[in-house]
Each structure stands twice: as structure tokens, then as C-alpha cells.
Amino acid sequence: MYAQLTLFDGPRSPELVAAAERAGTERIDPLLDSDPELRADLVARYVLTQPDGGSAVVVISRSEASLDKAIRLITTSELLPGEDPALLPGPSRVERYQVADVRSGDGAR
């Protein structure tokens, strides 16, 4: 398994945060959800936020190829009507790791 951390450093303005949230829910999530291969490979996804607008997306996937495919789909997708590219500067950085250990508590779903 592989983990990818996509980090958006804060502080980020409310406009940048709103644009990123819209891109995620209206364009990126439906795009990735429509790909059966990506859906089958996805183990978990967590979206983490900070009060200053910073955020991180943690994706756990069975294969590195799926992470590469997701990036390719996202970066080549057309913006939705009204999306402003100036408000979508992309992540501050992306880091990828091989998952070395997995532990789940009783509260894990």
C-alpha cells in the first residue's frame, strides 16, 4: 500500500478555501469516483483542515499506479464554469510513502 500526502500550507484566504472546496466536491471527487479502477484501489481518504485555511489530503491506495492516475486525471480535467484558476494554485507540496504498518482502533470504520 501507498500513502500520498497533498499539503496546502496556510494561511489561505476564505476565497482560496472556498474555491478548493468547490473543486473537490464538484469536479475532483466525481471525476475520481467515476473511475472503477481508482475506486477499487482506494483504501482510505482523509481531508484534514486547520483554522488558518491550511489543509492536507491523505490518500491510502493499494498501488502507486492509482495515485499516479489520479494526479493525471485531476491535472488534465477541465475547470467547471465559474472556477477561477487564480484561486486554484495547487498544492504546496505532495509527498508519497510506502505504508509500513497499519493499526486500527475500535473506533475505526
Image (cartoon, rainbow, N blue to C red):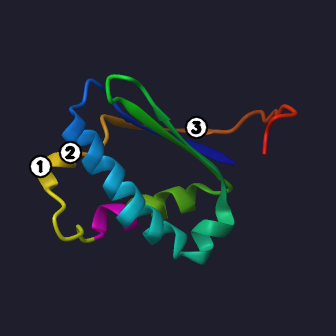
Residue shown at 54% from the left, 75% from the top: 35
Residue annotated with mark 1? 86
**Magenta region: which residues?**
73-77
Q: Amino acid at mark 2?
A: Pro
Residue annotated with mark 2? 89
Work out how far the residue at label 1 is from the one at label 3, CA to CA, in angstroms. Answer: 30 Å
Q: Amino acid at mark 3?
A: Tyr
Label whose residue precedes the other's in the sequence (3 or 2) = 2
Residue 97, labelled with which disc?
Answer: 3
Q: Crowdedness of circle 2 by 10 Å Cα count: few (<14), some, many (20+)?
A: few
* Nearer to me, 85 or 19: 19
Work out how far the residue at label 2 is from the one at label 1, CA to CA, in angstroms. Answer: 6 Å
Q: On the image, which quarter does residue 106 sit in?
A: top right
Prevailing SS of the magenta stretch: helix
Image location of residue 86, percent across then percent down: 12, 49
Q: On the image, which quarter does residue 97 sit in?
A: top right
Q: Are marks 2 and 1 in contact (CB under 8 Å)?
A: yes
**In this rendering, would 78 be left or right of 104?**
left
- The reply to whether the magenta stretch includes residue 39 is no
